[in-house]
Image (cartoon, rainbow, N blue to C red):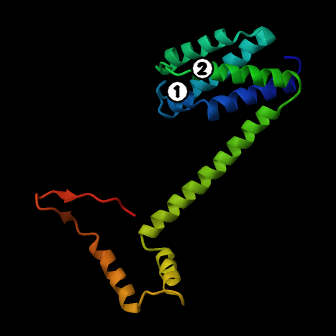
Amino acid sequence: MSSSINREKFTQGVSLLFKTQWTALKLAVDMQWGGHDSEDKRDWLIGVIVDYFDKNGKNTDIDDLGTILNQVMIDEFNTLLEDDSAYQVSQDLIKIYNECIQGNYLTVDLLQSNQESTKQNSFLHSKKIKNHEEDEDGNSDDYDEILGQQNGENSTIENDEVIGINTSKSSKNEPIIDDDGFTLVTRKR
């Protein structure tokens, strides 16, 4: 690669592609199919690919690159790819490399912004789960808010009916047993 900033951006692009976009590799790392050092193996693969592009440059063959990715997935992560993902990732790698040579970092920046938005969505989702757990403990007023909205001026629910709703909620905790003696399994809400 012609300049250090291109190498840095290319390495960042490869890293982001492998860590956020290639589902097979993400799953192999998350599930530790390569053992307890799966993350290290992924990071090693990033270095191997960057070095491969350093040696071959624009002469990088997409089929050879796909073969390398497939072989690493088999050897290091015990994963046989039956889809075309290694070839698709190879195409993306060549695209990122060609853009970095030209000083165009649009794809790398797009991958970076996608990762940041994914992290933000993950944070919001975990916060939502935490709030939902608090709801189950009775520490939230969502039920009262919904009830208050329903019992507004345009509501047709009478106070007696609201009391009936509150008392029936506690009876839902009891198991329902059918005529054959089987317990009905219901989804929690």
- Quarter of the image for the C terminus: give it: bottom left
- Which is nearer the N-term, disc 1 or disc 2? 1
Q: Which residue sits at x=53%, y=81%?
A: 149
Judging by the rendered image, the residue that carries numbered circle 1 is 37
Q: Residues within 10 Å of mark 2 (few under 14, many from 20)?
A: many
Viewer-closest of 24 and 140: 24
Q: Position of residue 112 (x, y in %)?
A: 74, 39
Disc 1 marks which amino acid? Asp
Q: Is residue 177 above or below residue 153?
A: above
Report the mark closest to the observer, 1 or 2: 2
Indicate the position of residue 64 as horizontal and vertical percent values: 65, 9
The total of numbered circles placed on residues is 2
Amino acid tagged 2: Ala
Tag 1: Cα neighbours inside 10 Å, few (<14), some, or many (≥20)? few
Instruction: Say which residue label 2 marks.
Output: 86
Q: Which mark is residue 108?
A: none
Query: How much space separates mark 1 and mark 2, taking CA atoms?
Result: 21 Å
Q: Is residue 70 left or right of residue 79?
A: right
State the image coordinates of residue 94 (x, y, percent, origin top left): 74, 19
Q: Secondary structure at mark 1?
A: loop
Q: For the point 77% across and 25% down, which residue is it?
A: 96
Q: Does residue 168 appear left or right of residue 63 in this picture?
A: left
Task: Give percent across and percent down for residue 89.
Answer: 65, 23
Choose top left, top right, bottom left or bottom right for residue 109.
top right
From this view, report whether residue 96 is shown above or below residue 123.
Answer: above
User: Which image quadrant for residue 44?
Assistant: top right
- Name the foreground residue: 158 vs 79: 158
Q: Does 57 appear above or below 133?
A: above
Name the residue furthest left.
Answer: 180
Point 72% across, 36% down: residue: 111
Which residue corresponds to the image point at 75% horizontal and 14% vertical from the top-left? Answer: 53
Seen from the viewer's position, the closer of residues 155 and 60 is 155
